[in-house]
Image (spheres, grey):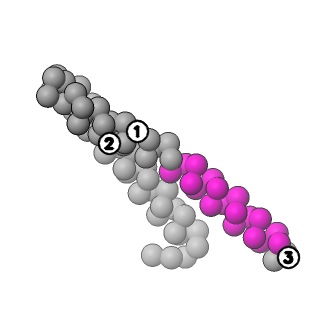
Amino acid sequence: MTQEEISAIKSQFFATVAHDLRTPLTAILLSTELLETYGHETPEEKKRQYLRCIREAAEQINKLLNDALDSYGIE
């Protein structure tokens, strides 16, 4: 495998990781913005849904990062 091929694979890998991180990050940002803006008038069950969304998205980001680090043998 040439250096150019390796570089292309790395670029594709990081582009994929960045894309996969943006989806849960968007959920986190939107949920926190909704809580900040409308939290005082939001029913408790809806607040719990937003918080659950934030937690699940953060867990997804953590898993993606761990998988990415594992693929490079980094802790």
Q: Quadrant of residue 44?
A: top left
Q: Which residue is mark 2?
A: 54
Q: Is disc 2 placed on a helix, strand or loop? A: helix
At horizontal 46% and vertical 63% (from top left) the residue drawn is 66
Q: Quadrant of residue 55?
A: top left
Numbered mark located on residue 2 in the image? 3
Please, is residue 37 above or below residue 68 in the view?
A: above
Please, is residue 58 above or below residue 35 in the view?
A: below
Q: Could you tell which of marks 3 and 1 lies nearer the N-terminus?
A: 3
Q: Is disc 1 placed on a helix, strand or loop? A: helix
At horizontal 37% and vertical 36% (from top left) the residue drawn is 30
User: How crowded is the residue under tag 1: few (<14 C-alpha within 10 Å), some, or many (20+)?
Assistant: some
Q: Residue furthest front?
A: 37
* Bounds of the magenta segment: 4-21
Q: Amino acid at mark 3?
A: Thr
Numbered mark located on residue 27 in the image? 1
Residue 53 place in picture, x, y as percent: 33, 37
Q: Is disc 3 placed on a helix, strand or loop? A: loop
Image label count:
3
The Cα–Cα distance between marks 2 and 3, rounded to whole angstroms, is: 42 Å
The Cα–Cα distance between marks 3 and 1, rounded to whole angstroms, is: 39 Å
User: How crowded is the residue under tag 3: few (<14 C-alpha within 10 Å), some, or many (20+)?
Assistant: few
